[in-house]
Image: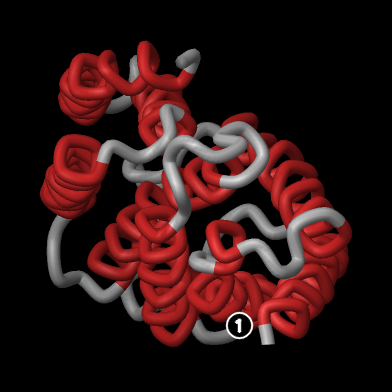
Amino acid sequence: MPRLKAILLFVATLGFMVASYSARNFRGYEPGDFPVPYTDPPIQPAGWAFAIWGLIYLWLIVHAGYGLFKRADDAGWDAPRWPLIISIALGASWLEVAMTAPLWATAQIWIMWAGAALAMTAAPKATQRWILAAPIGLYAGWLTAASGVATGVVLIGYGILSETAASLVMLAVIAAIALTLTRRFAPPASYPAGVIWALIGIIAANLSAAPVIAGAAALAAVALAFAAKPLLTSSWR
């Protein structure tokens, strides 16, 4: 069974990466899919921030490949596989869903985040950290922010909250989740790094147009950076 899971994870990860190229022009939910029109929701990071997906895909492929060919039957490597398989398998279809059904895509990305977070907490912290836990951590960190961003856009697009209110609420949710996971579970440093990268993208997108949003994102990033300081030390042990 561990070897079968290792194979499934490798195949799912390859599919996840390949599927991303079928929708490589995706830049967020289409405003026309919502009853309330909007342009450039402030909760959305600057476009360049999404380049982190290249690193995420590459690192996850290395993780899955090494786990299959070198650690297929290792109990520590096997521990995070089921939740990670579920998360990544859902990720392979997420872009296609997001282009046609934002509500379903938002529910889907939260399930992806839950799977990634469970996998991250199940992965051993002291065993081959940079190839076992760290790739999962970066993936989970980005999904923490991405889930909040997707929800914020839905709140704006359905007129539930104003652009400013939705952005501030979801920034608070992202910060609360990231701080809780960082303090309680001592994840790899790549986890808070993924969240902070997204927050930097939000800061950059709002510096001139919405300084209140940029300031809130900056406060969240600073708080998370301070919470992550012990992780930076332990990562090099």
Q: Looking at the rendering, which quadrant does residue 85 occupy? A: bottom right
Q: Position of residue 134 (x, y in %)?
A: 55, 38
Foreground of the two, 234 or 191: 234
Question: Which residue is disc 1 drawn over?
Answer: 97
Q: Residue furthest front?
A: 74
Q: How many labels were placed on the picture?
A: 1
Please give the name of the residue rendered at 38% of the width and 28% of the height, measured from the top-left corner: 196
Foreground of the two, 203 or 124: 124
Please give the name of the residue rendered at 36% of the width and 55% of the height, measured from the top-left corner: 121
Instruction: Please indicate whether residue 179 sits to the left or right of residue 101 in the image.
Output: left
Q: Position of residue 209 (x, y in %)?
A: 33, 24
Foreground of the two, 80 or 135: 80
Please give the name of the residue rendered at 57% of the width and 65% of the height, measured from the top-left corner: 75
The answer to whether residue 78 is visible is: yes
Quadrant containing the N terminus in the rendered view: bottom right
Q: Position of residue 161 (x, y in %)?
A: 13, 62
